[in-house]
Image: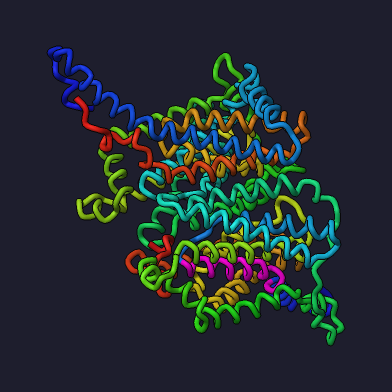
């Protein structure tokens, strides 16, 4: 830490926030689309890990990380379609199906990903914005991945699209009332099926980031609940894509706290700081929930807010 | 079941077929969950067979190995029963709140903290106090810890409206971080170098095996817990109130049922069973609290509870079945060269198919006596 001394901690948290937040951004944006349509997909953790495995495997075989990202998106969409298809039937509980799809996705990813733990895949490119500084810490902190930038742009685009496009309107109508949607001649099941598929493919991009950039390898412990925390994060962000982006940054920063403290020589109790993102999520849920009224801005047909 | 069954005199011959009807009706209603669950398991196995065929292995060989590894010999049966023991308790952690309509999936957190609490409670007592006192103290410590942990989820749910599924899972991650903190820090045995652990229990303080078997007492504890839970749900007013509240919360509140107390009570009890699973893991298997406590029993318990349709008695055979599948994992890996995640794929497939088959309830006329033709 020579050269920047104690400033290493906030810098490491800032750099960590950008590095760690990207999967949160994609999963939460995907989930915000799904939840806006009135359905909840708790299985995104499985989709994320399967996406990470697919992206890594395809990148190893084709030597192209971007092909890996595309393949991950395709598998994520398939997972979303399965979830959406099953939830279409009466008496099927979307939350329970989400848990089952999570276990299924994890199992399948570990099964098919076994041969890819050893080989090395090419990484996704990043843009060096820190060239002006001579400090290697600042340079590495400002080495920003392309997917982070795409995620930021996507958040703004989705925010605009929810408000101003026909597709955005359809999603909001379907999410608020199945009856109103049917009265308008829309099929809520089809809209939710597609929204879940898009949500799944975005969650898989989050997984691709994990295996192809940071931490940048494929193993069975690659995700630490990002897919699930993102679901809670969407509630905190009030189903607003820009809110999702900012919340993801906050979570990334909380997640970077433990490693940052460890890097400046804090050895006592840093395991507790690893719990920081989970504690933060829980505190936010407690503060923003209410037993009597439904949440402001919540899609009316969403089962999780009742 | 019906009043007709109590008629003492023998009815005339012509009416006897009519009197079979209540029995048939009773059978039909009972047969529905069994038939649909078995159908779902078969469909899940069929899908899994297709998957195994696609990856170029023989599903027949695989199922044969699963049987051999899980139930083929006395040794493997004992292995399966040992693996089923913690699943009985962690499945209850899902099934009890489910009767109230709550989906709690963070039992893993109660398992690891229950284990840490049990190990911590034993530390100052071993050596000076008899095992007959220390073991119950450990069990109570584990149950209180687990009960507080999952009970907190119930409190947050009822008094703050926090979604219990997400809250319980987040708390499972927090619990694992807390466990790591304790076993690497304040409770660490300096002698545990490679694998940080608490100070191991002396051998005479361990919870031993059931006489004549190589299975520890955890199995008996788990089965007793299932029976007690079944009685609680089916035969007490507390359980009856819970079933009403699980069916319709508003109706229960209008009836004046203490919904808040029911939710907190059921979640706390559920958590205490998971905490007990952690205690058994420490006192009968590991001998100390360490990272092996987070072995995923809490997550497999979710599947067991859903397969058993949250019926505590049905949990017993389902847990043994899944314990057997789990026990055969090593054999499948060695003999067929399939990854250890094969078992996970099978579990995930079964889980999805079982939940999908919920949609078939009430669709078959044969199970619904109200739709039968009036005869005789």
Q: Quadrant of residue A50?
A: bottom right
Q: Is residue B199 left or right of residue A58?
A: left
**Residue B14 visible at all:** yes
Residue B278, image x and y in percent? 55, 39
The span shown in magenta is: A17-37
Residue B291, compared with residue B173, is above or below; it is above
Residue B264, image x and y in percent? 36, 50
Q: Is residue A36 magenta?
A: yes
**Residue B120 visible at all:** no
Residue B275, compared with residue B61, is above or below; it is below
Q: Extreme bottom residue here? A: A132
Residue A131, image x and y in percent? 85, 84
Residue at the (65%, 80%) spot, across then down: A153
Q: Is residue B144 left or right of residue A82?
A: left
Q: Looking at the magenta stretch, what is its main secondary structure?
A: helix
Residue at the (62%, 54%) spot, across then down: A46
Residue at the (59%, 40%) spot, across then down: B347
Q: Quadrant of residue A201?
A: bottom right
Quarter of the image with the C terminus of chain A is bottom left
Residue at the (40%, 53%) spot, across then down: B154
Closer-to-camera residue (B229/A124): A124
* Display coloring: rainbow
Residue A234, image x and y in percent? 52, 69
Q: Is residue B366 magenta?
A: no
């Amino acid at each position: 830490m020579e050269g920047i001394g104690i400033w290493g901690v906030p810098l490491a948290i800032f750099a960590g926030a950008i590095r760690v937040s990207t999967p949160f951004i994609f999963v939460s944006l995907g989930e915000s689309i799904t939840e806006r349509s009135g359905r909840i997909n708790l299985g995104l953790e499985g989709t994320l890990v399967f996406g990470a495995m697919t992206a890594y495997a395809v990148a190893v075989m084709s030597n192209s990380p971007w092909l890996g990202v595309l393949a991950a998106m395709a598998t994520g969409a398939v997972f979303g379609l399965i979830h959406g298809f099953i939830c279409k039937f009466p008496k099927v509980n979307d939350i329970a199906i989400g848990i089952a799809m999570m276990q299924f996705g994890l199992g399948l990813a570990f099964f098919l990903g076994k041969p890819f733990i050893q080989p090395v895949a090419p990484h996704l490119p990043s843009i060096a914005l820190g060239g002006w500084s001579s400090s290697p810490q600042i340079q590495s902190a400002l080495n920003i991945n392309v997917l982070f930038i795409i995620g930021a742009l996507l958040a703004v685009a989705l925010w605009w699209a929810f408000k101003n496009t026909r597709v955005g309107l359809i999603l909001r109508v379907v999410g608020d009332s199945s009856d109103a949607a049917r009265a308008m001649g829309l099929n809520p099941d089809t809209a939710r099926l597609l929204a879940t598929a898009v949500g799944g493919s975005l969650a898989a991009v989050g997984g691709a980031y994990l295996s192809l950039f940071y931490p940048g390898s494929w193993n069975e412990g690659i995700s630490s609940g990002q897919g699930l925390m993102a679901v809670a994060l969407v509630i905190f962000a009030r189903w607003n894509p820009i809110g999702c982006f900012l919340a993801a940054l906050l979570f990334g920063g909380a997640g970077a706290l433990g490693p940052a403290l460890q890097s400046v020589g804090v050895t006592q109790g840093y395991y507790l700081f690893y719990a920081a993102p989970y504690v933060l999520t829980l505190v936010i849920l407690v503060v923003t929930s209410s037993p009597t009224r439904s949440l402001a801005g919540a899609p009316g047909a969403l089962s999780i807010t009742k | 079941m019906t009043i007709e069954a109590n008629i003492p005199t023998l009815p005339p011959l012509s009416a006897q077929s009519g009197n079979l009807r209540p029995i048939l009706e009773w059978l039909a209603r009972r047969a529905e969950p069994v038939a649909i669950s078995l159908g779902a398991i078969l469909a899940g196995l069929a899908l899994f067979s297709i998957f195994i065929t696609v990856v170029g292995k023989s599903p027949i060989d695989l199922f044969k190995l699963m049987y051999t590894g899980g139930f083929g010999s006395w040794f493997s049966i004992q292995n399966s029963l040992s693996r089923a023991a913690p699943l009985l308790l962690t499945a209850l952690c899902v099934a009890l709140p489910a009767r109230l309509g709550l989906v709690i999936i963070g039992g893993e957190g109660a398992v690891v903290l229950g284990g840490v609490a049990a190990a911590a409670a034993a530390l100052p007592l071993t050596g000076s106090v008899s095992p007959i006192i220390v073991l119950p103290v450990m069990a109570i410590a584990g149950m209180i810890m687990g009960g507080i942990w999952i009970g907190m989820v119930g409190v947050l749910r009822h008094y703050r409206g926090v979604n219990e599924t997400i809250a319980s899972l987040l708390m499972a991650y927090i619990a694992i971080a807390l466990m790591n903190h304790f076993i690497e820090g304040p409770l660490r045995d300096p002698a545990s170098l490679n694998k940080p652990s608490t100070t191991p229990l002396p051998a005479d303080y361990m919870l031993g095996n059931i006489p004549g078997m190589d299975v520890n007492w955890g199995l008996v504890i788990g089965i007793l817990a299932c029976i007690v839970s079944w009685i609680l749900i089916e035969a007490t007013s507390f359980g009856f109130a819970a079933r009403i509240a699980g069916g319709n919360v508003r109706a229960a509140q209008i009836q004046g049922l203490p919904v808040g107390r029911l939710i907190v009570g059921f979640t706390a009890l559920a958590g205490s069973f998971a905490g007990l699973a952690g205690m058994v893991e420490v006192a009968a298997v590991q001998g100390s609290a360490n990272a092996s406590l987070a072995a995923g029993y809490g997550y497999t318990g979710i599947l067991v509870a859903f397969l058993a349709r949250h019926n505590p008695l049905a949990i017993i055979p389902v847990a043994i079945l899944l314990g057997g599948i789990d026990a055969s994992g090593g054999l499948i890996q060695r003999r067929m060269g399939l990854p250890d995640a094969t078992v996970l794929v099978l579990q995930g497939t079964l889980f999805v198919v079982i939940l999908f088959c919920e949609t078939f309830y009430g669709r078959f006329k044969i199970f619904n006596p109200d739709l039968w033709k009036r005869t005789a």
